Image: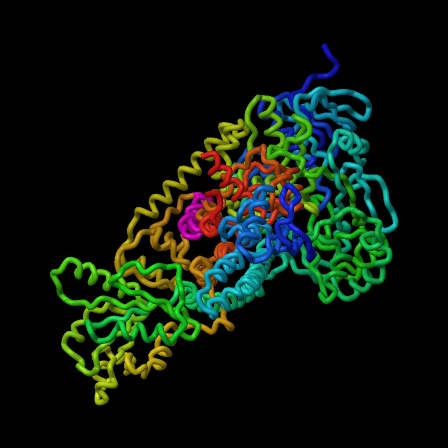
Amino acid sequence: MSLRKVYDVIVVGAGHAGIEAALAAARMGLRTACFTTNLDNIGMMNCNPSIGGPAKGHLVREIDALGGQMALTTDQTFLQMRLLNSGKGPAVQALRAQVDKRAYAWKMRLVMEQTPNLDLKQGMIQDIVVEGGRVQGVVTATGLFFSAKAVVLSTGTYLHGKTIVGEVQRQSGPSGMAPSVGLTANLVRLGFEVGRFKTGTPPRVDGRTVDFSVMARQDGDVEPWRFSFLSGRDQREQLPCWLTFTNDQTHEIIRNNLHRAPMFTGVIEGRGPRYCPSVEDKVVRFADKESHQVFLEPEARESIELYVLGLSTSLPEEVQIEALRSIRGMEQVELLRAGYAIEYDYVLSTQLRPSLETKLVAGLYCGGQINGTSGYEEAAAQGLIAGINAALQVQGQDPLVIDRSEGYIGVLIDDLVTKGSPEPYRMMTSRAEYRLMLRQDNAHLRLTTKGREVGLVDDQRWRAFVTLRDAISAEHDRLERTIVGPDEDVQAVLRHAGSSELKTGASLAQLLRRPEITYDHLLGMGAGREDLDRGVIQEVQTLIKYEGYIKKEIEQVERMRRLEGKRLPPDIEYASLGGLSMEAREKLDRIRPATLGQASRIAGVSPADVSMLMVYLEKRVRIER
Amino acid sequence: MLVHGWVVDTDGIPVDEVLAVYMKGPRSFTGEDVVELHAHGGPVAVKRVLQLVLAAGAHLAEPGEFSRRAFLNGRMDLAQAEAVIDVIRAKTDRAMAAAVHHLRGELGQEVRSIRDRLLLVTAHLEADIDFPELELEVATIHEVEDGCRWCLGEIQRLLGGAHTGKILREGLRVVLAGRPNVGKSSLLNRLVRENRAIVTAIPGTTRDVIEEWVSLGGVPVQLADTAGIRKTDDPIEQIGVERTHAALTRADLVLVVIDAAAGLLSEDLEWIRQLPVGKARVGVANKIDLAPAFDRRDLADALGGEAVVTVSADKGTGLETLESLITESAGLHDATEGLVVNARQAEALQRARAHLEAALETLEAGLGSDMVSIDVRAAWVALGEVIGETVGEDLLDQIFSRFCIGK
């Protein structure tokens, strides 16, 4: 017997992307191996102890619908759960969890250990073996070769990682872990273009040295939702977060030390995310702002460690301590770990296909922060798709590509492979043009069927889904069909809600369409169903209440679709196509978009360029006729 | 770069002495490299030069080809490209002036400033949605409300120019109507003789309805004389009557002409009753020189109080008043102040207006910023269509219908 097994799929990295990729491939029945530089660091949350939020929460729900793991593990280990944007309409409401970092990482490792077909291995991968344009396997730093039909790279921020605190720099992954060295050079040798990004994290402090009495307490929801529709309810105690603010003194300390800030001294070369600026960046760019929010978040249930959200920094350690102690409630605070900036290599994502397979090497996939994204959720979503598609390829099947109209995952990946990103890419709801349809509350309705088709949705999940789906459509029908008259119990509820009274009969759906009427009012009339799951009620209410808006959005989508549907023949010679701008010619030639819609989203391709392409296509059709 | 030289044929024999201009792209009309040859004016010389150029591989420009290339090369927005066509087709100085405004991209600038504001509104909405911890909600609602209202006002102002645009482009249709022998033809001839007649490419469709184009105070006016309407069994005359009805239906203004010398007859009244409802009308009492005692109030009453003017087509009196009544009825904006927009642009502006109104309603109903944003976004897209910055099927249709591509 050979020393080493032959694998179908090898996943490099066991962070949020690697976990989903490895679990997906193994659950789809493929012989899978997952390599990590340290088995004790599986599923680490190296930055904030939270999962979800606008758009990110949507991604987690979609991962769940497709049969991924992130939602389930978050539900098992959350410390606090809140529905954000609850007053802003159903499409942008978003679930956000404070998560117990230790419990999360531990649970994730356990899930992986218990998954059949999956081998966990500690080892640093240094080279990718490619023959005839197809991946053959990987080589570890210790010189072992492992054969695989497909390889998923999900190396996160470890590639050639370098951390910076003030004047101190070291070769390191996040949280002081070993960086991945050598792989970048080999990727470049294979022909990949790589870039360098920067991100950062705030200091962590000792909760015993914080005076919470002068801070605003922020609690979780009384009846918290869950990310996965499979998760049951429990009565666990939720932990609070605490809000305080920076002040003049804090800003003064930071300003006085800007000459020692790597962000400004030229030490940091990589581009950082604008939406997640360091505190020194905020103080410089928004000089007129008197204070900035600072949230203290628990890192784990059984820990004194607190994460200081809003104070991401790479200032020298002693400056961090001084700045922290200038903040109300933290005058006596003890620093546990200093904040730091981290630079790392990433692979330019426009070198990928929509399946996340590299265009350069067949069978090689990239998912997660290696593609220039930020965030656990973005990473997990890509890891899941990369793992599914690696597995599908080994099985000889077509890849799974989620359309922009079907999910945030589709938006994320289409943006990455079409546009790339000049800064670490974060998912935001504004990136989704089909936002009203891509609600977090209907992710399972949108994607469970796709998860079932690829074989990731097991019978238990499928049955639960079918029950839910049928309950929603039954209640929807009932509300449309049930007519109430101007009886006193109906009128009383309407009066109380400040709604006009009925003159003739009306369907319950018609009543629900009134902005001021909710399902609770129907219950008050005795016309609602008390026994229904609140997920069902919410879904039905949204469908009915916002029907007109959703229709409007569908119309807009249809218009876009016509553009989307126009295929760009692969033989177009953009270089010789008159009327295109130089930049458009170069970009189109390099990215070679499949459709006119994709072409229109490429940065540097102007509407005039798109018109030119439309005219060209139309001419071509006319000539062919 | 201007160069002097000779055009020579393939055997090297001089054909004409010319000036050649070389304009290097993108600083040319189309944005491409352009060479112009300025030959002597004689038909033979020009023809010979043209033959040589064509033999060397050039082709004759298709209608609108230069504008199309300029648009596709990003040298002008769609409104400007359309304006080129309007400049070429302009019938009067005033229509020309309006088209030139467009050519200078002024509509584009106006629309872009509205779009910029909407982008700001969107930025507020999106920041509030994606960064809820910043607690921007109250400020956002104010910005959305103010922004949408300001944009609505601006769109309304631009739409005010839509009617003017139509009149300047297509002309004001004025139909002279009245029973036979009240002097309609002589009135028409007089108006044509005293004003600059416009030679138009649009031919008169029938001998029974005589059409002439004149420029009245810069407004292109199509004057149509109609056959008298009377009950008749003569099939030929019947056709004339039908055509008169058709002309009246299309009219922007009807001149109801009567014979002042004969007075207001029951036949005239019958006539007035048969006019299509809702048309702008002016009463014209002709032959006033023969009936100095004519009381114009009779005709005014018959017309429900509308303006009446007394004229003499023979003597040429009262014509100025009539002309100013005609131009007033067009209700034109001053072309130098407002911008005139064409039907396609007006349609897109109206759609943008409807979306912004819907966005404000949604905001008032408190239905959530995601629902508000859908209409704000749609308004932004619609405005983009005005200047060709949003790409859609409609734009493709426009390009193909206006620039004669790929016949």
Residue A495 placement (x, y as % from top left):
35, 63
Counting every numbered tag in the picture gives 0
Q: Is residue A317 left or right of residue A7?
A: right
Residue A140 placement (x, y as % from top left):
78, 25
Q: Residue at x 61, y 36 (%)?
A: A573
Q: Residue at x 47, y 74 (%)?
A: B334
A516 within the magenta span: no
The image shows residue B252, relative to residue A441, as above or below, that is below
Name the residue nearer the viewer: A92 or A75.
Answer: A92
The magenta region covers A533-553
Name the residue nearer the viewer: A459 or B155.
Answer: B155
The image shows residue A159, relative to residue B289, as above or below, that is above
Q: Is residue A149 left or right of residue A478?
A: right
Q: Is residue B372 visible?
A: no
Name the residue nearer the viewer: B18 or A285.
Answer: B18
Q: Residue at x 40, y 68 (%)?
A: B220
Name the residue nearer the viewer: A43 or B391.
Answer: B391
* Quadrant of the image occupied by residue B296: bottom left
In this view, which residue lies farthest toward the top? A1
The image shows residue A62, relative to residue A37, as above or below, that is below
Q: Is residue B288 left or right of residue A312?
A: left
In this view, which residue lies farthest toward the bottom? B293
Residue A269 placement (x, y as % from top left):
80, 47
Q: How are the residues colored?
A: rainbow
Q: Residue at x 75, y 52 (%)?
A: A312
Split into 4 quadrants, where in the image is the C terminus of chain A? top left
In this view, which residue lies farthest toward the front? B13
